[in-house]
Image (tube, rainbow, N blue to C red):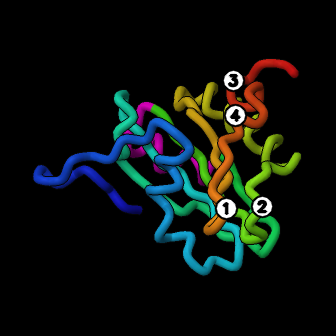
Amino acid sequence: MTNPGKASDVEPRICNSSDDVLELLRDQLIGLEQEQFWVIGLDIRNRVRSIEVVAKGTVHTVAVYPRDVFRSAIRTNVAGIVLAHNHPSEDPTPSLDDIALTRRLVAAGRLLGVPVVDHVVLTEKHGCVAISDYHPSAVTGGDE
């Protein structure tokens, strides 16, 4: 886990958009041939407090468990989290499984008092897609 913004002489990074998430993780995306799943912990002002890889998968899937996603968030007392994972295929379109996972993690976050701010699908060369933009009810917890 990294802890950006802890040093007093470093300005904390702000994470307000999917492009901010892409910029935070850009260097980690280079050459990835399998899916990875990150959790970015934020304070109340959306300043990045932690970035952690919680799962590594295969070329087209990654197994993600709520206990792994929320463990660090609870321990570090962050105000909310952003979820992110890459698509090695370079197609940032969220899959039905991505949307279903987002819904499950949003529900778990509500129970635990750790809101999921968004879930971003990243690619090295073709940008990113925020699931909140693609399928808003997955992140808000509303019905279709």
**Which sits earlier in the primary sequence, circle 2 or circle 3?**
2
Q: Residue at x 44, y 44 (%)?
A: 41
| Quarter placement of the N terminus | bottom left
Mark 1 vs 2: CB contact within 8 A: yes
Number of other residues with Cα within 10 Å of mark 4, as a class: few under 14, some 14 to 19, many 20 or more = some
Q: Secondary structure at mark 3?
A: helix
Report the magenta residues as a range. Answer: 67-79
**Which mark is drawn over residue 140?**
3
Question: Can you identify the residue that label 1 sits on?
Answer: 126
Mark closer to the observer (1, 4): 1
Q: Secondary structure at mark 2?
A: loop
The answer to whether 116 appears left or right of 23 in the picture is: right
Cα–Cα span, label 1 and label 2: 7 Å
Whole-percent x, y for residue 2 in the image = 36, 61
Cα–Cα span, label 2 and label 3: 24 Å
Q: Is residue 78 magenta?
A: yes
Cα–Cα span, label 4 and label 2: 16 Å
Whole-percent x, y for residue 112 in the image = 57, 30
Mark 2 vs 3: CB contact within 8 A: no
Instruction: Count numbered badges in the picture.
Output: 4
Q: Amino acid at mark 2?
A: Asp
Whole-percent x, y for residue 62 in the image = 75, 64
Question: Can you identify the residue that label 4 sits on?
Answer: 133
**Which sits earlier in the primary sequence, circle 1 or circle 4?**
1
Q: Residue at x 66, y 42 (%)?
A: 130
Q: Amino acid at mark 1?
A: His
**Which mark is drawn over residue 57?**
none
Whole-percent x, y for residue 92 in the image = 74, 56
Question: Can you identify the residue that label 2 sits on?
Answer: 91
Residue placed most toward the observer, 90 or 138? 90
Residue placed most toward the observer, 91 or 70? 91
Please tell me whether residue 30 is drawn above or below residue 49 in the rendered image: below
